Amino acid sequence: MGFIAVMSHKQKHVPQRTCVICRQKVDKRQLTRLVKTPEGVYVDSSGKQNGRGAYVCDNPDCRLRAASTDILNKALRTVLSDEDRQRLRDIAP
């Protein structure tokens, strides 16, 4: 009797993150990471920038709520300035 090795293909792990506004859990690549830096809150396009981060989905309602409510203040442990809020409104979905 011979032994037949079966090659199993492992599925690559896809990180999941939660939108801080709607609380939906989706793939990390489908969300926009916002990061708090000493200069303010910015979009982290690389996803690796130093600083406290929070994720927001591409839903226009979530982006509007992120800019107009205090949900991000809590998530990023900061107080958003008027410039930060305007920067968030300018993000293209």
Image (cartoon, rainbow, N blue to C red):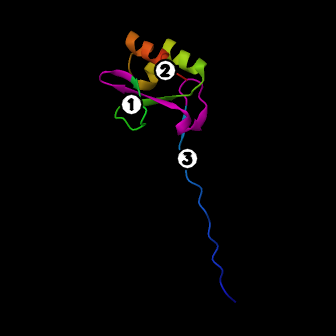
Q: Measured from the top left, where is residue 80 in percent x and y?
A: 40, 15
- Residue annotated with mark 3: 14
Q: Is residue 76 among what the camera can see?
A: yes
Q: Measured from the top left, where is residue 27 in percent x and y?
A: 57, 39
Residue that appears at 39% across and 38% down: 48
Residue that appears at 60% across and 25% down: 22
Q: Residues within 10 Å of mark 3 (few under 14, many from 20)?
A: few
Q: Which mark is residue 52?
A: 1
Tag 2, which secondary structure?
A: loop
Q: Quadrant of residue 24?
A: top right
Upstream in sequence: badge 3 or badge 2: 3
Q: Which residues are magenta?
A: 19-41
Viewer-nearest of labels 1 and 2? Answer: 2
- Residue annotated with mark 2: 91
Q: Residues within 10 Å of mark 1 (few under 14, many from 20)?
A: some
Q: Is residue 70 left or right of residue 6?
A: left
Tag 1, which secondary structure?
A: strand
Residue that appears at 55% across and 15% down: 64
Quadrant of image for the N terminus: bottom right
Q: Is residue 69 left or right of residue 60?
A: left
Disc 2 marks a residue whose amino acid type is Ile
Upstream in sequence: badge 3 or badge 1: 3
Disc 3 marks a residue whose amino acid type is Val
Farthest top residue in view: 82
Tag 3, which secondary structure?
A: loop
Residue that appears at 47% across and 21% down: 72
Look at the picture and state if 47 lies above or below 36: below
As measured in the structure, the alpha-carbon distance from the residue carrying label 3 to the one carrying label 2 is 25 Å
Look at the picture and state if 1 lies above or below 12: below
Farthest front residue in view: 92
